[in-house]
Image (cartoon, grey):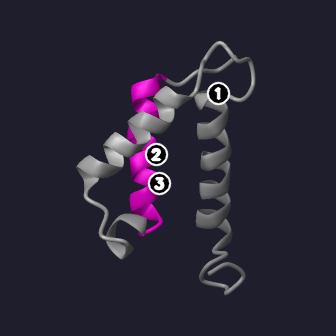
Amino acid sequence: AREIDRSVTLQLSMRMFSDLNFVSKFKIPEDKLARFLLIVQKGYRETIPYHNWTHAFSVAHSAYTLLMNLNLVELGILT
């Protein structure tokens, strides 16, 4: 199985929020976003084999990839 270090997933999650303009649109301070993501990450128990932080990050990254590569917002499919 491929694994990404948990600290890297936090950095990438912050980048996704930024790339999707959530940080600027909603005026989210980066330190608050970082704390929020840490709290979400710590809320998952890694002993659970499927619904854990790795799965949550994977789902978020898949959605991010679709949004960025298919231009769904620009095409008016998503708002």
From which residue to which does the magenta span run? Answer: 5-21
Question: Which amino acid is tagged 1?
Answer: Asn
Question: Which amino acid is tagged 2?
Answer: Ser
Mark 2 to mark 1: distance in Å? Answer: 15 Å
Secondary structure of the residue carrying tag 3 is helix
Residue lying farthest to the top in this orientation: 47
* Above/below status of 17 relative to 11: below
Badge number at residue 52: 1
Position of 50 with respect to 29 (left or right) is right
* Above/below status of 70 relative to 53: below
In the figure, residue 37 lies in which quadrant?
A: top left
| Disc 2 crowd, CA 10 A, few/some/many (<14, 14-19, 20+) | some
52 is within the stretch colored magenta = no
- Name the dominant secondary structure of the magenta segment: helix
Which residue lies under the disc numbered 3?
16
Secondary structure of the residue carrying tag 1 is loop
Q: Residue at x 59, y 56 (%)?
A: 64
Which residue lies under the disc numbered 2?
13
Residue 59 percent location from the top left of the image: 68, 44
How many numbered dots are placed on residues in this image? 3
The earlier-in-sequence mark between 1 and 3 is 3
Residue 65 percent location from the top left of the image: 62, 55
Q: Nearer the viewer, residue 48 or 8?
A: 48
> Which circle, 1 or 3, is nearer the viewer?
1
